[in-house]
């Protein structure tokens, strides 16, 4: 998949951007604060409905009005053209696909799969479990069609169970827990399967990226400790009633990462964490590519995160996946593959000829 045309209106300092990127590699360069990351951020917002830099949509709106807009025309792997657009003003949004209104932002995500590496990507290793759950769930969303429905149904039953706990409705809990256990177990099995596939790829990826890390090991933690989820819920009910929240279930799941039997977050340097995170993200790209879906890859300020050798290795592996790659940085660089270079200055984006 690749973006054929991109239009951005009123996002941060980008008043109006109109570009036709290369289907292979696009290099955005310019001074810090020029707006390079905002271009990539616009693509993320179009794909996910939210930014990776802020949870507040109002912070994205520039000075040219009370809303922002992003429009892209893409070509997928079957050479089918899709037109996607998103307009957002505070809490209100409107999304369109090929001229038709969309009811859910997840429909954008399905049509514009996108993987982002940015300076905080190391949180995949050192951050809280929520970061790794979102990472696994993104992959499951694109490779397993039943995942989204299962995730939504589980999220709904979790809210119902927590409400019953707060009001101490034990009779309601008796009826909820069987459904909760069924959905939670199904969600856990899907996540574990995807985690196992990633684990089988990461070590080879690390070697190819020039890392000396060895014996990287994954442990998928379901989010409960006793036998079945049903048993864990029953054993923990009294504590759940005291806290007013559910303590066992896939909403507590995590991927524990180990290096030579020690927790990776405690023994790896920041640079090693970044390389491991790059391997984790690229493994998902390759899993999707194997299925015929080549996501767009965004590499934000990658040259500042790695030395030249590791930068070139990460970029080469990304390009090898066959999808469109976007790279931002304070300087440009030469590439042997077909590419376009865009200079970004004071919110203006100009293609260099």
Image: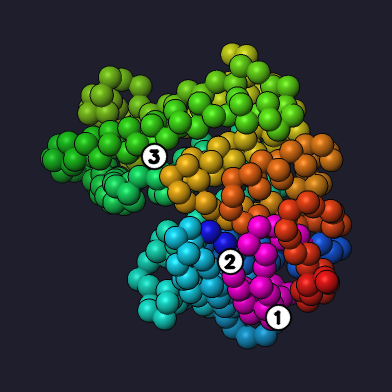
Question: Considering only order in the chain, which callout, 3 or 2, is on the residue closer to the N terminus?
Answer: 2
The residue under label 1 is 15
Any mark on residue 96, and which? none
Give above or below for 154 relative to 36. Answer: above
Find residue 318 and report its horizontal and vertical position in percent. Answer: 65, 45
Q: Is disc 3 placed on a helix, strand or loop?
A: helix
Residue drawn 61% across the image and 16% down it = 215
Q: Which residues are magenta?
A: 3-28
Looking at the image, residue 300 sits to the left or right of residue 123; the answer is right
Label 2 crowding class (10 Å Cα cut-off): few <14, some 14-19, many 20+?
many
Secondary structure under badge 1?
Answer: strand
Q: Position of residue 346 (x, y in %)?
A: 82, 74
Q: Nearer the viewer, residue 223 or 256?
A: 256
Q: CA distance from mark 2 to mark 1?
A: 20 Å
- Label 2 or label 3, whichever lies nearer to me, is 2
Q: Is residue 274 visible?
A: yes
For image coordinates 27% across by 28% down, the residue present is 229
Give the numbered dot on residue 251. 3
Report the coloring of the rendering. Answer: rainbow
Residues 73 and 262: in front is 73
By secondary structure, the bulk of the magenta-drawn segment is best described as strand
Badge 3 or badge 1: first in the primary sequence: 1
Residue 272 falls in image quadrant:
top right
Label 2, secondary structure: give it. strand
Residue lying farthest bottom? 65
The residue that appears at 70% across and 57% down in the rendered structure is 25
Front label number (3 vs 1): 1
The quarter in which the C terminus is drawn is: bottom right
For the residues marked 2 and 3, what is the alpha-carbon distance in whole angstroms? 34 Å
In the rendered image, which residue does mark 2 sit on? Answer: 3
Q: Is residue 275 above or below residue 141?
A: above
């Amino acid at each position: 998949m690749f973006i054929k045309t991109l239009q951005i209106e009123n996002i941060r300092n980008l008043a109006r951007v109109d570009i036709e990127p290369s289907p292979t590699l696009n290099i955005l360069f310019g001074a810090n604060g020029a707006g390079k990351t905002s271009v990539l951020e616009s693509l993320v917002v179009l794909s996910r409905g939210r930014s990776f830099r802020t949870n507040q949509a109002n912070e994205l709106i520039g000075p040219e009005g009370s809303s922002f807009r992003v429009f892209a025309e893409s070509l997928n792997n079957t050479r089918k053209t899709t037109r996607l657009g998103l307009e957002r003003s505070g809490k209100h949004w409107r999304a369109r696909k090929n001229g038709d209104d969309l009811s859910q932002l997840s429909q954008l995500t399905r049509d514009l799969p996108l993987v982002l590496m940015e300076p905080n990507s190391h949180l995949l290793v050192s951050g809280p479990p929520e970061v790794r759950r979102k990472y696994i769930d993104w992959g499951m969303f694109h490779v397993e069609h039943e995942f989204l429905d299962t995730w939504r149904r589980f999220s709904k039953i979790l809210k119902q169970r927590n409400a019953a706990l707060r009001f101490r409705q034990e009779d309601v809990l008796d009826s909820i827990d069987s459904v909760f256990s069924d959905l939670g177990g199904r969600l856990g099995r899907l996540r574990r399967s995807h985690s196992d596939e990633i684990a089988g790829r990461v070590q080879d990826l690390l070697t190819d990226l020039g890392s000396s890390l060895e014996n990287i090991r994954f442990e998928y933690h379901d989010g409960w400790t006793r036998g079945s989820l049903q048993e864990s819920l029953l054993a923990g009910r009294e504590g759940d009633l005291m806290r007013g929240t559910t303590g066992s279930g896939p909403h507590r799941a995590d991927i524990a990462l180990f290096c030579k039997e020690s927790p990776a977050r405690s023994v790896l340097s920041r640079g090693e964490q970044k390389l491991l995170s790059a391997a984790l993200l690229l493994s998902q790209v390759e899993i999707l590519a194997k299925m015929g879906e080549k996501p767009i890859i965004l590499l934000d300020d990658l040259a500042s995160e790695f030395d030249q050798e590791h930068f070139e290795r990460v970029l080469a592996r990304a390009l090898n996946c066959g999808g469109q790659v976007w790279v931002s940085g304070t300087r440009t660089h030469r590439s042997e593959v077909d590419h376009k270079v865009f200079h970004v200055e004071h919110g203006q984006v100009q293609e260099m000829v």
